[in-house]
Image (cartoon, rainbow, N blue to C red):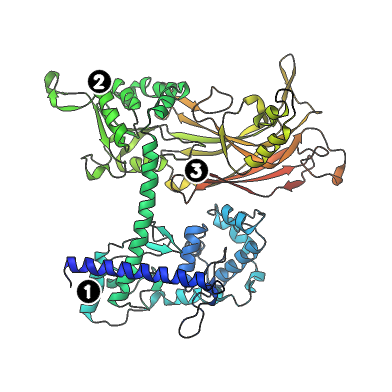
């Protein structure tokens, strides 16, 4: 084996050669615009990328890379689906044809929603909620007929399946050891490249490269090296190193992107202005203050961890409530220093160099700089030694830029069995808003001039992006409904990706003498939906004084405001029956909808710490007929 210095030089030369080849190829591609991926052929004249993706126009040379692409980009894990439903060859054959037929009609394979275009469909795709229910839709013999002519995928995935039990052909032991060492040196465990997207998730989702794959002659698990089955193909040392360096290079690129987003995120919290805004939020401070200070049986003598402590206010509350130790974790360098100084100025900072009465250390607050996922590398905290896990992790629309993943990591790593987590529940609500929730009223009368044209343009633009703003409860025109509830004591990290439905009915009116009655003659336009959340400090842990932190339009406003999703087209709703019968469209002034069904999906965005939201709306007439509007897609980033 070469020395480390020589090896590094060879790796640098290989990186440079790869980059030069990429640049040369890009230049050739620009010079010859007519030549594309579909025209490129190998030495034997066969197309190198003949397998068409199930959802987009991407093509791949192997099933492995195609299915990895589908799993990481389109939320469809072919292998996991087959395993979960124990699909045989024919059922898998049907599934592929079913998905192709749905995509051709711009329909979602898992929920059946119809989108306006293929791009809208690609934005809408989400993880399947219940695979067993979906199976009924494709378990039909008509899907045994290929939907797409000459669909190579239908006859390729079985080859991959049949190759699982193949044995590695005999090899020279020294060559095997050299190959293994060269891969181990690159530290490629659990790394995969799928169409330019890096994923370090479990091998159940995408193919990975285990370090000990050379020692496993037979296994039911699939083992892939950059899209090649390791049992049927044994690369040379140079090939393995080159492919490994490509993987490592892509991994480094993605890690740098995540690092940049994290640095920007934590850097934004180095501004005192945002902390003043949060500390001035009375609803926020009252809820956390009551939960921590009014539940002595929970906090007295407890070991507490505060994830994302900021200025350290919640850690100070915990110390004031009688905690024996408070571990305040903060990723921002500046705010970690600030939290330490604040705790010190208030006599609550742990100082191991000084002892108080009876030899006890003064102060209980220990500020740790770093992300909670990394603190065990530098600080000695025993796993499952924390009594109470505390955090104010919520972002706009609850999940935007939130630290929920970090809180769940801390729960699984540090919290004792049966330990408390504050808050322990979170719920997202939805309701429809009317004209008052838009900017239309302002533009209809500007110094007694009609500028409603501007207002209509703004409403049209608002249908493209989510808006974070305060909505007055008087501007809500429908009932509110629970969209999704999370139990932080038991939920899994992937539960933050969800699809949920809700039914919104016209809001009743107060007509006279304060009595609530239904106005059968009143109709109004619903311009969109508004989302808000509540977090609960329930009696499960807060026995003496449970409380709720609400960002509802019906309660005092908070710095979170609400999240507004505007319809492309307003929906007329009300209790009045339509006059034109079947001639008028549901949801119009001539035929108001009796209620509106909405389906909302919220998933993590490919942009780190951002979320993608899809919204589907169905108007329901008094006699049960339904009218659907095209799905809309929003990105909160």
Q: Residue furthest front?
A: 31
| Disc 3 and disc 2 in contact, CB within 8 angstroms | no
Q: Mark 2 falls on what kind of element?
A: helix
Q: Which residue is mark 1?
A: 177
Return the x and y of residue 188 as percentages of the image width and height: 31, 63
Spatial CA distance of label 3 from label 1 is 47 Å
Q: Toward the viewer: 227 or 485? A: 227
Q: Residue furthest top?
A: 513
Residue 244 position (above or below residue 622): below
Q: Earlier in the sequence, mark 2 or mark 1?
A: 1
Q: Which residue is mark 3?
A: 637
Residue at point 87%, 38% (across, down): 579
Residue 137 position (above or below residue 335): below
Q: Which residue is mark 2?
A: 345
Residue 307 position (above or below residue 585): above
The disc label shown at residue 127, or none:
none
- Mark 1, Cα crowd under 10 Å, few <14 / some 14-19 / many 20+, is few
Marks 3, 1: nearer the viewer: 3
- Mark 3, Cα crowd under 10 Å, few <14 / some 14-19 / many 20+, is some
Which quadrant holds residue 101?
Answer: bottom right
Q: Toward the viewer: 259 or 613? A: 259
Q: Is residue 363 visible?
A: yes
Residue at point 40%, 65% (across, down): 207
- Mark 2, Cα crowd under 10 Å, few <14 / some 14-19 / many 20+, is few
Spatial CA distance of label 2 from label 1 is 59 Å
Spatial CA distance of label 3 from label 2 is 37 Å
Q: Earlier in the sequence, mark 3 or mark 2?
A: 2
Q: Is residue 161 left or right of residue 16?
A: right
Return the x and y of residue 511 as percentages of the image width and height: 76, 19
Q: Toward the viewer: 271 or 54? A: 271
């Amino acid at each position: 084996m070469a020395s480390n210095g020589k090896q590094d030089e060879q790796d640098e030369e290989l990186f440079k050669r790869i980059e030069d080849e990429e640049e040369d190829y890009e230049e050739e591609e620009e010079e010859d615009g007519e030549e594309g991926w579909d025209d490129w052929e190998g030495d034997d004249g066969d197309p190198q990328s003949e397998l068409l993706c199930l959802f987009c126009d991407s093509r791949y040379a192997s099933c492995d890379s195609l299915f990895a692409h589908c799993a990481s980009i389109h939320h469809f894990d072919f292998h996991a689906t087959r395993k979960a439903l124990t699909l045989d060859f024919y059922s898998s054959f049907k599934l592929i044809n079913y998905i192709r037929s749905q995509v051709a009609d711009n329909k979602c394979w898992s929920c059946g929603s119809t989108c306006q275009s293929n791009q809208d469909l690609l934005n809408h795709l989400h993880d399947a909620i219940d695979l067993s229910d979906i199976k009924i839709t494709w378990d039909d013999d008509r899907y045994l007929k290929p939907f797409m002519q000459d669909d190579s995928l239908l006859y390729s995935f079985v080859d991959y399946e049949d190759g699982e039990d193949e044995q590695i052909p005999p090899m020279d032991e020294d060559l095997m050891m050299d190959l293994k060492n060269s891969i181990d040196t690159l530290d490629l465990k659990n790394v995969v490249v799928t169409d330019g997207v890096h994923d370090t998730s479990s091998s159940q989702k995408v193919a990975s490269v285990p370090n000990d794959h050379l020692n496993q002659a037979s296994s039911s698990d699939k083992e892939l090296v950059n899209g090649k089955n390791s049992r049927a193909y044994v690369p040379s040392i140079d090939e393995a190193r080159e492919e490994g360096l490509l993987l490592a290079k892509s991994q480094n690129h993605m890690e740098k992107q995540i690092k940049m987003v994290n640095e920007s995120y934590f850097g934004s919290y180095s501004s005192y202005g945002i902390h003043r805004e949060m500390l001035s939020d009375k609803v926020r401070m009252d809820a956390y203050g009551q939960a921590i200070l009014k539940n002595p049986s929970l906090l007295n003598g407890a070991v507490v961890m505060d994830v994302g402590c900021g200025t350290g206010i919640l850690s100070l509350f915990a110390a004031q409530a009688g905690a024996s130790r408070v571990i305040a974790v903060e990723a921002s360098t500046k705010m970690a220093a600030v939290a330490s100084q604040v705790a010190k100025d208030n006599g609550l900072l742990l100082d191991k160099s000084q002892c108080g009465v009876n030899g006890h250390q003064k102060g209980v607050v220990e500020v740790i700089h770093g992300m909670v996922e990394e603190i065990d590398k530098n600080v000695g905290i025993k796993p499952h030694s924390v009594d109470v896990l505390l955090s104010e992790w919520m972002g706009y629309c609850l999940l935007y830029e939130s630290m929920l993943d970090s809180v769940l990591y801390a729960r699984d790593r540090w919290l004792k069995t049966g330990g408390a987590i504050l808050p322990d529940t979170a719920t997202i609500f939805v309701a429809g808003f009317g004209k008052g929730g838009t900017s239309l009223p302002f533009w209809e009368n500007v110094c007694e001039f009609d500028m409603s044209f501007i207002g209509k343009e703004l409403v049209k633009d608002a249908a493209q992006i989510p808006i974070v703003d305060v909505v007055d409860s008087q501007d809500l025109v429908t009932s509110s409904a629970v969209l999704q509830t999370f139990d932080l004591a038991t939920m899994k990290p992937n539960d933050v990706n969800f699809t949920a439905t809700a039914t919104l009915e016209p809001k009743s009116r107060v007509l006279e003498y304060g009595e609530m009655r239904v106005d059968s003659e009143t109709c109004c336009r619903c311009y969109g939906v508004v989302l808000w959340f509540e977090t609960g400090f329930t009696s499960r842990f807060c026995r003496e004084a449970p409380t709720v932190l609400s960002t509802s339009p019906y309660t005092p406003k908070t710095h979170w405001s609400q999240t507004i999703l505007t319809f492309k087209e307003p929906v007329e709703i009300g209790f009045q029956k339509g006059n034109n019968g079947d001639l008028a469209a549901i949801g119009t002034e001539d035929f108001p909808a009796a209620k509106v069904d909405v389906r909302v999906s919220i998933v993590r965005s490919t942009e780190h710490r951002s979320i993608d939201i899809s919204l589907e709306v169905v108007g329901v007439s008094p006699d049960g007929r339904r009218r659907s509007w095209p799905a809309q897609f929003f990105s909160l980033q």
